[in-house]
Amino acid sequence: MSPKRTHHTPLPRLVVISAPSGAGKTTLSSMLLKEFPQLQRSVSTTTRPKRPNEVEGTHYHFVDDSTFQDKINQNLFAEWALVHGKRYGTTRATVDSLLARGKNPVFDIDVQGAMNLQALYGDRVLLIFIHPPSMEALKERLVQRKGDSAESIENRLNNAYSEIKWSQKYDYQIINDNLERAFQELKTIIQHECLEKEK
Ligand code: ADP
Ligand code: 5GP
């Protein structure tokens, strides 16, 4: 006979962090991952070119169009989407291996990916949206980051408006004006929604 479970242990939550490009989600999620070893980044696959500071396998798996298409054909993606004209996706293997190790996967993915993961994993998905303090600040951050062409920056700014409209579907919204304050808010959410409830 198997031992009786005395209390209910919920399954680990999947943490999705979305934001218009340049709002600071990479910065904030990196700070979060340093603070909580329980959280592990889900590394996406993309067809966009690598930025100078990026490392293959750490920031993304960088692939060409035909490799990405092969993965779609083999049904290897839990979700994928066309974002700013390039393809980005989360493989099932990435999610499964993090969950199998008892980790909380953290996804830096767009609104389409967030909705698709929620359709797959339901209430286990925690949706957090990061807002820039203003559109002017967003543009300034994109320019200062120096990773994208002028055309790509223009495209990212245009897309920001429609992404922000989706933010009402998210469980929590954070305004990233002061980085430390935004980080404190994010930590409080994670502590409350993931770490305490899963104990
Ligand atoms: P995202 O991942 O959302 O595209 P990043 O994390 O790359 O955005 O941030 C875009 C730029 O803005 C980076 O150069 C980053 O250092 C800067 N940044 C992030 N948060 C803040 C903040 N609160 N105040 C000022 N600059 C910020
Ligand atoms: P960037 O090119 O700035 O790294 O990312 C561009 C956008 O693609 C961001 O909004 C980011 O959240 C999104 N993105 C990154 N990886 C994935 C993914 O695996 N799936 C989806 N749907 N979006 C992703």
Image (cartoon, rainbow, N blue to C red):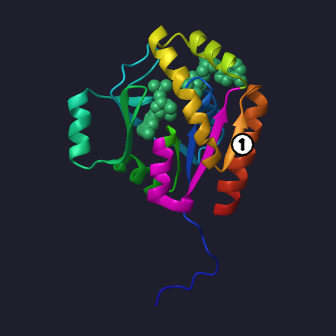
Residue 143 appears in which quarter of the rendering? Answer: top right
For label 1, the residue is: 187
In the rendered image, the residue lying farthest to the bottom is 1
| Residue 125 painted magenta | yes
Which quadrant of the figure contains the C terminus? bottom right
Q: Is mark 1 within 8 Å of ligand 1?
A: no
Residue range highlighted in magenta? 112-132
Residue at the spot 45% in from the left edge and 20% down from the top edge: 54
Provide the secondary structure element on which disc 1 rests: helix
Please indicate, yes or no, whether residue 4 appears anywhere in the rendered image. Answer: yes
Residue 72 image point, x, y percent: 26, 43
- What residue appears at the point 55 percent right and 45 percent down from the top-left corner? 16
Front residue of this view, candidates 122 and 29? 122
Q: Is 112 on the left or on the right of 57, as rendered?
A: right
Picture coordinates of residue 52, whole percent (x, y): 44, 13
Q: Which corner quadrant of the figure contains ligand 1?
A: top right
Residue 24, given in percent of the width and then of the height, sits at 62, 27
Q: Is residue 92 left or right of residue 182?
A: left
> Is 145 contained in the magenta span?
no
At x 47%, y 42%, the residue is: 112
Q: For the residue marked with disc 1, what is the amino acid?
A: Lys
91 left or right, relative to 108: left
The kind of secondary structure the magenta stretch mainly shows is helix
The residue under the point 21% across, 45% down is 73
Q: Quadrant of residue 30?
A: top right
Give the number of marks.
Answer: 1
Q: Residues within 10 Å of mark 1 (few under 14, many from 20)?
A: some
Vertically, is 18 above or below 180? below
